[in-house]
Image (cartoon, grey):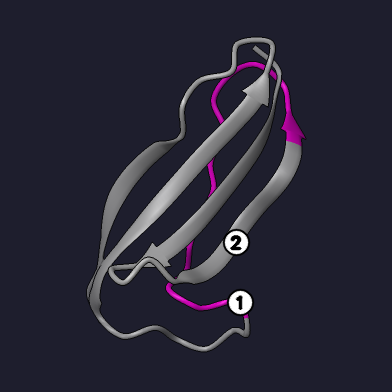
């Protein structure tokens, strides 16, 4: 279903690293968001474990989805 989507990347301490999408409208179907291993200021992040959280607000709202990411430099 069409939704407004937010995607954010957090470090293992729960601190926001970068917000990839902030309440952006998307049509129904598949979409892609790419994190290039940088923080919001454009600085490279060290190797480690991060978490991406996706939140969709639309006609079929659900709970946020979280995916573990492993960044290897």
For label 1, the residue is: 40
Residue 69 visible in the displayed image: yes
Is 35 contained in the magenta span? yes
Q: Are marks 1 and 2 in contact (CB under 8 Å)?
A: yes
Residue 41 position by quadrant: bottom right
Residue 28 position by quadrant: top right
N-term mark: 1 or 2: 2
Vertical order, 53 against 26 (above or below): below
Q: CA distance from mark 1 to mark 2?
A: 7 Å
Answer left or right for 18 relative to 66: right
Q: Residue at x 48, y 62 (%)?
A: 35
Vertical order, 3 against 55 (above or below): above
- Neighbor class of circle 1 (other Cα within 10 Å; few <14, some 14-19, many 20+) is few
Vertical order, 34 against 72 (above or below): above
**In the rendering, at what x and y percent does residue 63 appear?**
46, 27
Q: Residue at x 31, y 85 (%)?
A: 46
Q: Residue at x 55, y 48 (%)?
A: 7
Q: Which residues are magenta?
A: 25-40
Element at label 1? loop
**In the rendering, at what x and y percent does residue 14 appear?**
37, 66
- Neighbor class of circle 2 (other Cα within 10 Å; few <14, some 14-19, many 20+) is some
Answer left or right for 65 relative to 72: right
The quarter in which the C terminus is drawn is: bottom left
Answer left or right for 73 relative to 63: left
For label 2, the residue is: 19
User: Which residue is outermost to the right?
Assistant: 25
Element at label 2? strand
Q: Residue at x 70, y 50 (%)?
A: 22
| Dominant secondary structure, magenta | loop
Residue 34 visible in the displayed image: no
Is 37 contained in the magenta span? yes
The quarter in which the N terminus is drawn is: top right
């Amino acid at each position: 279903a069409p939704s407004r989507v937010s995607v954010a990347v957090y470090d293992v301490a729960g601190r926001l690293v970068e917000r990839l999408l902030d309440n952006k409208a998307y049509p129904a179907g598949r979409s892609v968001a790419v994190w290039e291993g940088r923080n919001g200021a454009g600085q490279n992040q060290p190797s480690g474990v991060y978490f991406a959280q996706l939140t969709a607000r639309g006609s079929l709202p659900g709970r946020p989805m979280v995916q573990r990411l492993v960044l290897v430099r």
